[in-house]
Amino acid sequence: MSEVAERLGVNTATVYGLCGHGDLPHVRVSNAIRIRPTDLEAFLARSRR
């Protein structure tokens, strides 16, 4: 999660919020949230527009 936050330039709470609102696709594995690199790239491409 911290790698995603660093890549987006935000804190981890913001990443959790993006996941919770459905803005950033993710998969929950037990208590962990996993984000595919391709989903992160697609999110970045959408947010640059």
Image (cartoon, grey):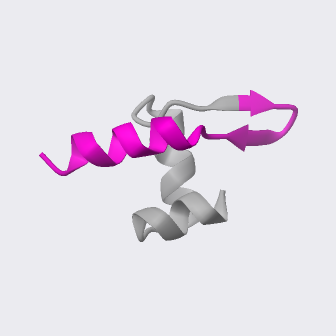
* Residue 46 figure quarter: top left
The relative height of residue 30 versus residue 41 in the rendered view (above or below) is above
How far from the left and from the top, in percent, is residue 27?
A: 67, 28
Residue with the most extreme right position: 30
**Quarter in which the C terminus is drawn:** top left
- The one nearer the camera, 16 or 29, is 29
The relative height of residue 5 versus residue 23 in the rendered view (above or below) is below
How far from the left and from the top, in percent, is residue 13?
A: 56, 59
Q: How many marks?
A: 0
Residue plotted at (45% across, 28% down): 22
- The one nearer the camera, 14 or 49, is 49
The relative height of residue 45 versus residue 28 in the rendered view (above or below) is below
How far from the left and from the top, in percent, is residue 26?
A: 59, 32
Q: Is residue 5 magenta?
A: no
Range of residues picked out in magenta? 28-49
Residue plotted at (53% across, 35% down): 20
For residue 20, side relative to residue 22 (left or right)? right
Residue plotted at (41% across, 71% down): 9
For residue 33, side relative to residue 41 (left or right)? right
- The one nearer the camera, 41 or 15, is 41
Q: Is residue 38 magenta?
A: yes
Residue with the most extreme left position: 49
**Quarter in which the N terminus is drawn:** bottom right
Residue plotted at (47% across, 35% down): 39
